[in-house]
Image (cartoon, rainbow, N blue to C red):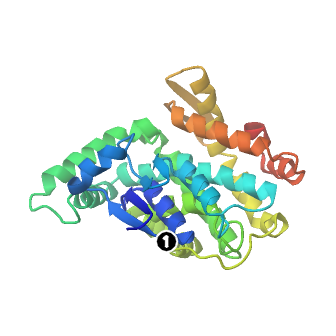
Amino acid sequence: MAAYRLFGAETSPYSLKVRSALRYKGLAFDWVSRSASNEAEFRKSAATPTVPLLLSPDHAPAQDSTLILAALNTAHPEPEAAPEEPTCAALALILEDYGDEWLNKCMFQQRWGQQPDRDAAALRVLVQLSDGKRPRAFKAPAKQIASRMLARLPLVGAEPENAATLEASYRRFAQLLNAHLQNHLFIFGGRPSAADFAIAAQFQQMLTDPTPATWLTDRAPFVVAWCGHMEDPKASGPFAPLDELSATLLPIFEGEVSRTYLPWAFANAASASREKKRFSVTFDDGVFEQATQSYAARAFAAVRAEVAGRMSDPALPAFLDAAGARAYVS
């Protein structure tokens, strides 16, 4: 039996994030596609009803993908998955949270907020839950899944009023990332970081949904190729120094991360600290309003703490200043 056992779903970006990291580390693991037949086994160890769930003989069950990746890096240092330069390490953590907390909204809106994506996704979820087989009577349960997920849009801030902002955001980010990946195999050079695992997982999901898949294939071919490579990534060289990355990495932060995710995360954290139920933040294209997300606030606090611990590297405040990001993370 493999040392690790990963309960996940092909429709879950966080499951793909962890699976990709396990493969990169060269670790033997059993992939368990969560379904009706293994639900009882899943519930024995899961603290929350969502995947992923990583089981191992030496550690407690884990479901937070960010903490799982950090633990894997500690337990299995090679191959490296965190840039050596303090500035690049901090930027990788910011981008990981961008993928987990902001790009996920974009993916969720594209999948469940429009047709034909919603019906196609609902059927994929139903097949997964049915042990990989489409039930004979599938229309009614698939419709129930679609309706349930449509109702969840406001919980993640992907309600119709925010749809245009989220669509413009992921497209802007994809094109900036596409320009960067024309010259770099991974975001920080010759091997993947937490940023690659998190962001690729969200785009991999979008590539299974008709509307964003068509757009990405046409407008961001290097992102599409990178997503394929991230299914089972291999290190092909060292992490690159910041000087070799900045020309196309800085525009990603300046043109997108500092325009959407960082002001959103900052406002959400402030709302959570005041125990408010809702908050709003103003972007270039208008007001973005949603329910306060406590987990996202805790995740952002952890990112800010990590960034603060690396601010003694003069390259980091200089990069954040140039990107218009420093006020949000320092």
Decide: few, some or many residues near mark 1? Use Cα within 10 Å; few <14, some 14-19, many ≥20.
some
Which residue is rendered at x = 40% and y = 60% of the image? 5
* Left or right relative to 186: residue 246: right
Which residue is rendered at x = 77% and y = 70% of the image? 240
Which residue is rendered at x = 50% and y = 52% of the image? 167
Q: Quadrant of the N terminus?
A: bottom left
Name the residue tied to disc 1: 231
Q: Position of residue 64 (x, y in %)?
A: 50, 47
- The answer to whether any part of residue 256 appears in the image is no
102 up-or-down from 237: above or below: above
Q: Position of residue 37 (x, y in %)?
A: 20, 56
Which residue is rendered at x = 83% and y = 51% of the image? 316
Q: Please name whichever residue, 34 or 326, is drawn nearer the observer in this view of the structure.
A: 34
Q: Position of residue 23 (x, y in %)?
A: 51, 70
Q: Please name whichever residue, 311 or 115, is drawn nearer the observer in this view of the structure.
A: 311
- The answer to whether any part of residue 145 appears in the image is yes
Number of marks in picture: 1
**Within the image, what quadrant is residue 133 found in?**
bottom left
